[in-house]
Image (tube, rainbow, N blue to C red):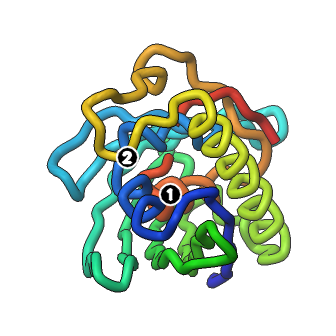
């Protein structure tokens, strides 16, 4: 299934692009996610806790940036994740681009998501997945803005947010795989700041 989302960042395009490439800083802004390892500057491992009704799931996976175009401020992220107990998985290709918008920036995201295993039954309704994606992106954007206000250090500065490693991860209610997609996409984006749908 494919769908599009977007969110605004109160920074100029170049600064927004640098921020989105700073996974350690933005990962804590994604609800329900946790950055677990940085393999290199373009490859990351992480996990996301999700609650689907009475069932709690934890998806672990890896995301890799490719086709990075700094001049156009766009990139593609490939990610995959599997439930720790073997109840399904997800593969996603997420393309994102930063564009100028009235003194700030808009991040455009196109996601192609494939679900597998028992979890796939929850993703049959494309509308539900799109709604959840919109909610997660909205929460991420709000958390990111709050972080920028609290820690206005320039992207790429030596200071980094470490809450992703110390704060407990709270499950995301709803469709977790969607989020997994997101975590890759926005990748960088993607960690354990407290925000629940």
Residue 45 left/right relative to 31? left
In percent of width and height, residue 148 lies at 57, 39
In percent of width and height, residue 72 lies at 36, 85
Residue 2 left/right relative to 125? left
Q: Quadrant of the N terminus?
A: bottom right
Q: Is residue 68 above or below residue 29?
A: below
Residue carrying label 1: 89
Q: Secondary structure at mark 2?
A: loop
Which residue is nearer to you in this view: 109 or 93? 109
> Of label 1 and label 2, which has the lower sequence position?
1
Task: Determine the residue located farthest toward the left in the rendered image.
Answer: 40
Residue carrying label 2: 155
Mark 2 crowdedness (10 Å alpha carbons): few <14, some 14-19, many ≥20? some
Residue ID at (26%, 74%): 66
Look at the image and tell me whether residue 76 can be seen: yes
Which residue is nearer to you in this view: 3 or 54? 3
Residue ID at (72%, 67%): 123
Q: Is residue 88 above or below residue 79?
A: above
Residue 183 left/right relative to 18? right
Residue ID at (48%, 64%): 185
Residue 161: image quadrant is top left
Q: Report the Cα–Cα distance between label 1 and label 2.
A: 32 Å
- The label nearer to you, 1 versus 2, is 2
Residue ID at (48%, 70%): 13
In percent of width and height, residue 177 lies at 60, 56
Which residue is nearer to you in this view: 20 or 12? 12
């Amino acid at each position: 299934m494919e769908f599009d989302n977007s969110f605004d960042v109160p920074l100029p395009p170049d600064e927004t692009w640098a921020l989105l490439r700073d996974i350690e800083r933005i990962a804590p802004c994604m609800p329900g996610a946790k950055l677990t390892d940085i393999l290199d500057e373009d490859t990351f491992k992480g996990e996301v806790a999700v609650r689907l009704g009475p069932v709690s799931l934890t998806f672990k996976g890896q995301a890799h940036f490719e086709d990075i175009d700094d001049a156009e401020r766009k990139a593609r992220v490939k990610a995959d994740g599997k439930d720790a107990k073997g109840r399904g998985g997800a593969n996603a290709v997420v393309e994102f681009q930063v564009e100028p918008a009235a003194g700030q920036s808009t991040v455009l995201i196109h996601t192609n998501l494939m679900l597998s295993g028992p979890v796939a039954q929850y993703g049959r309704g494309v509308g539900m997945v799109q709604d959840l994606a919109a909610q997660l992106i909205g929460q991420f954007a709000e958390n990111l803005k709050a972080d920028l206000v609290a820690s206005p250090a320039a992207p790429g500065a030596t200071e980094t947010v470490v809450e992703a490693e110390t704060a407990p991860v709270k499950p995301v209610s709803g469709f977790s795989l969607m989020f997994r997609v997101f975590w890759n996409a926005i990748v960088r984006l993607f960690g354990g700041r407290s925000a629940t749908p």
